[in-house]
């Protein structure tokens, strides 16, 4: 056979290197993918939740420790001292706020009492912390004086919010009773005056002793009484 | 990745569901509770911190008050009613005003007055039932009208309250005046604080 006989053959020739074997296609099953995903996800979630729980538990424990230390810092004794002092201050302030000067009331009554008029009896009552009620039995020489006195009480008294004149009576003088005050002032009536506590503040005015009393110092109750200092 | 067998895949899915249902979900719920607790503890700790800070400030304020002022406050609003000391002080005032004492007695704690003030305090101040306890004294004096006014003025200038709650004045035949007074002083009883 001549050497070029193969080239003239009509049968196609193929070299041995060109013969490639086809690999089979990789098959991925959907069910396998889901199962893999689920198992890994559950394991990851379990691990993550375990670690996060530990972290949160440590945070909680830390918070409890801090809370305990804050509670330990709190002093009941200090609170008691402060609360007692506060209550004492409030009570003292309350009494000062509701203090009323009786001298102011008497001065006001003096200023609205005409000279010939005589106050036979005066009764002053404090009604709680609201008001002072003054009931005065007043005797005058005539109806004109009584009317004038009533006018003074109603118009003149700035302190008094309510003025009531009642029980007007006329006494008839007998020979024996001439010397008695109530008959020499035959017209008597009762005046009821009320003044709110808040308009009667205490005003500090120096006191001039009426008689010379040997200087007896008013004791300082802080040193004499058994009051306990704060 | 080598494919599992069908049985193994089913087992893996069941295992995943079991882990999720029996471990992950309860753990997540537990984490939620822990977070809630932590938040609550934080809130409470902040409250206690604020209270401690407030208390420290109040203690500092309390300590900044001078001893003399504290003593004066204790005199003004004492813890106990020392009736003998108070009666002695009233008799000093009687002597200083130049009036003559005709009666002086201690009537004890006045619960009726306390009731009155409690009623008023519900409208006016915030003390309510914690108002100071009133103690009553009865005083009778005789003197001139200016002397009686001086006596009243000295009562007002006293170091502790001696409030006049009842005053009856009437003229006598000698030209002087009789005055009967009901005085109230206050005691700072702290039973309510200690009970709280």
Image (cartoon, coloured by chain):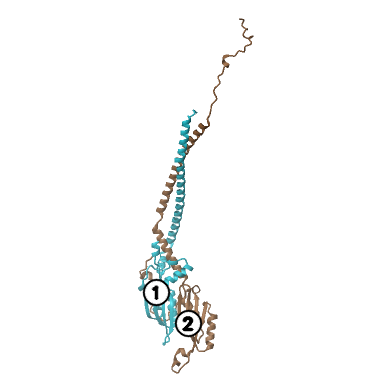
Chain colours: A brown, B cyan
Residue at numbered disc 1: B136
Label 2 and label 1: CA atoms lie apart by: 24 Å
Asked if both marks, 2 and 1, belong to the same chain, the answer given is no
| Front residue (pair B168, B76) | B168
Q: In terms of secondary structure, where does tag 1 sit?
A: strand
Q: Mark 2 belongs to which subunit?
A: A
Mark 1 crowd level (few <14, some 14–19, many ≥20, 10 Å Cα): many
The answer to whether residue B32 is visible is: yes
Query: Furthest-bottom residue in view?
Result: A175
Residue A65, x across and y down, in percent = 41, 49
Residue B1, position as x, y percentages in the image:
50, 28
Q: List x then y, in percent, for residue B91.
A: 38, 77
The residue that disc 2 covers is A136
In screen coordinates, is A4 left or right of B195?
right
Q: Is residue A133 above or below residue B4?
A: below
The image position of residue A97, as x and y in percent, is 47, 70
Asked if residue B124 can be seen in this view, the reply is no
Residue under the image location 46 percent in, 36 percent down: B14
């Amino acid at each position: 056979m001549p050497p070029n006989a193969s080239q003239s053959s009509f049968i196609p020739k193929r070299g041995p290197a060109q013969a490639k074997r086809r690999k089979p296609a990789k098959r991925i099953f959907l069910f396998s993918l889901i199962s893999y995903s689920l198992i890994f996800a559950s394991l990851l979630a379990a691990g993550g939740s375990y670690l996060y729980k530990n972290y949160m538990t440590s945070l909680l424990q830390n918070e409890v420790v801090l809370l305990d230390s804050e509670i330990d810092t709190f002093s009941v004794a200090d609170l008691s001292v402060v609360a007692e002092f506060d209550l004492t201050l409030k009570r003292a302030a309350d009494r000062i706020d509701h203090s009323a000067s009786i001298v102011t009331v008497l001065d006001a009554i003096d200023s609205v009492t005409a000279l010939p008029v005589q106050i036979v009896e005066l009764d002053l009552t404090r009604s709680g912390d609201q008001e002072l009620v003054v009931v005065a039995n007043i005797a005058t020489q005539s109806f004109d004086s009584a009317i004038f006195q009533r006018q003074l009480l109603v118009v003149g008294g700035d302190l008094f919010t309510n003025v009531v004149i009642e029980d007007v009576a006329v006494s008839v003088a007998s020979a024996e009773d001439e010397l008695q005050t109530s008959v020499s002032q035959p017209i008597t009536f009762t005046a009821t005056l009320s003044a709110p506590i808040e308009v009667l503040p205490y005003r500090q005015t120096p006191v001039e002793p009426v008689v010379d009393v040997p200087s007896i110092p008013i004791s300082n109750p802080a040193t004499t009484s058994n009051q306990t200092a704060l | 990745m080598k494919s599992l067998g069908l049985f193994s895949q089913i087992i893996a899915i069941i295992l995943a569901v079991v882990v999720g249902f029996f471990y992950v979900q309860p753990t997540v719920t537990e984490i939620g509770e822990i977070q809630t607790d932590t938040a609550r503890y934080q809130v409470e700790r902040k409250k206690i911190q604020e209270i401690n800070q407030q208390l420290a400030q109040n203690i500092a304020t309390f300590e900044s008050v001078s001893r003399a002022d504290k003593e004066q406050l204790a005199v003004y609003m004492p813890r106990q009613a020392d009736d003998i000391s108070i009666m002695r002080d009233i008799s000093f005032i009687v002597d200083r005003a130049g009036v003559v004492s005709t009666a002086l007695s201690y009537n004890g704690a006045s619960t009726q007055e306390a009731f009155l003030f409690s009623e008023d305090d519900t409208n006016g101040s915030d003390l309510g039932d914690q108002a100071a306890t009133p103690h009553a004294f009865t005083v009778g004096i005789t003197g001139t009208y200016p002397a009686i006014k001086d006596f009243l003025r000295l009562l007002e200038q006293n170091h502790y309250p001696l409030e006049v709650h009842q005053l009856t004045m009437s003229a006598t035949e000698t030209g002087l005046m009789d005055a009967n007074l009901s005085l109230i002083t206050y005691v700072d009883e702290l039973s309510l604080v200690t009970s709280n």
